[in-house]
Amino acid sequence: MKIKNICCIGAGYVGGPTMAVIAQKCPEINVTVVDINESRIAAWNDKDVENIPIYEPGLSEIVSEARDRNLFFSTDVDSAIDKADMIFISVNTPTKTYGIGKGMAADLKFIELCARQIARVSTSDKIVVEKSTLPVRTAEALKNILDNTGNGVNYQILSNPEFLAEGTAVNDLMNPDRVLIGGDIETEKGSEAVQALVDVYAHWVPKDQILTTNVWSSELSKLTANAFLAQRVSSINAMSELCEKTGADVNEVARAVGMDSRIGSKFLKSSVGFGGSCFQKDILNLVYIAKSFGLNEVADYWEQVIIMNDHQKRRFAAKMVQTLFNTVSGKKIALLGWAFKKDTNDTRESAAIYVADYLLNEQAEIVVYDPKVKAEQIYADLDYLNSRSSEENRSRVKVVKTSYEAAKDAHAVAVLTEWDEFKELNWKKIYDDMLKPAFLFDGRRLLERKTKEEIGFEFYAIGS
């Protein structure tokens, strides 16, 4: 089975970069990324490739090479579906905010809409690939929709979860630890479909790093991987609080623990809390699945990871208020960083949003600088919380273009994203431009201890 045309429904953080790399590595395959969001597609097609809607190091160069050669971005969803041999579904699967499973289960309405559109449009056999992170057995629901509402077309459903870390997505795609493909490997047609996708990735990924499983194992592996990673972050954050009480250094503890070959050093950086679109959503989904099977102890175990993460964000903000003489009312607080991590403009579930919200509820005046996040996104994130009116958010939160502008006349500066440029700042100048007494709250442990000794300001850190 030779793939000549690929369609990806969804031009977001997963679909866009993944399809760009596939197009670059497979020049004989035409790849079309479709989305109903006209402004997003227009941004992907912008003549200045630096204006594409997603910032990832190295992505603009790949898009520039492949775009209009065999990589296309379009709002004509029906045409792309009809032409495609293989269709990736890469749409948002947020946590439900209504009905059964509210606050935990994944909302699959966009997945169902995609399935129904594929069934309505398709006139030839298709391989449909789940790229979005989905609950176990979603493929079964997809197949039921496609088989019972279509035009007699035959479909094979594959699960191909992404294991991308924002900020390193291009490298993760180019040099993956593994590519996981789940399909109906017990049947001839299913095995052919799996092999077709294996052949796409084999253009650049060694075949021993391409794993094939049944669909259910593939779907659950994604949730499990994110749960394990998030668990590590919450575990070291729990220890960071104990370190502060005992006088231990959380970085030294993490280094000692990370050198144990059974544990390893990754995801042992204490911080304000993990963010992003995956960890919290996937763990809540796992909690819901466990509860639906009556596995309450399993559900409670994984839910504690979320509880610890929320606690860490509240604790950081509360410590700021406490250190600033138990009031931040009317005080200017500068937040450096809004993205949930460096090297991305993604702000979903960023700790900065919740720290800002806490401080605004305490009547602080907030000034924000982030090198890649636009002002309208910052205001949209705050508006989404519905803690106050949009007008109040815009009157009490100012977005500026440099760290120094943010810090000028501030009572405190909080470093909330570990952007590399923050390591190179002239912290002596920042301190001189701040009001005195002034404080630095470093949620990512970017500064060397000598900075505190040389400058002499009070320094509170909860680790990185």
Image: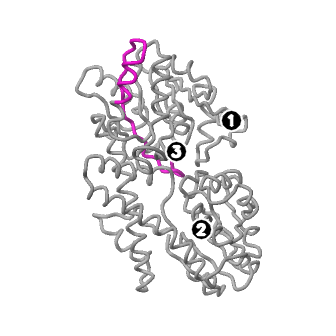
Q: Amino acid at mark 2?
A: Tyr
Label 2 SS: helix
Q: Residue furthest front?
A: 99
Please provide percent x and percent y for residue 16: 55, 37
Q: Nearer the viewer, mark 2 or mark 1?
A: 2
**Label for residue 170?**
3
Residue 356 or residue 416, whichever sits in front: 356
Q: Secondary structure at mark 1?
A: helix
Label 2 crowding class (10 Å Cα cut-off): few <14, some 14-19, many 20+? some
Label 2, on which residue? 358
206 or 182, nearer to the observer: 182
Q: CA distance from mark 3 to mark 1?
A: 23 Å
Quadrant location of the N terminus?
Answer: top left
**C-alpha separation, residue under disc 2 versus residue under disc 3:** 34 Å
Q: Earlier in the sequence, mark 2 or mark 3?
A: 3
Residue type for callout 1: Ser
Residue at the image position 31 percent from the left and 30 percent from the top: 183
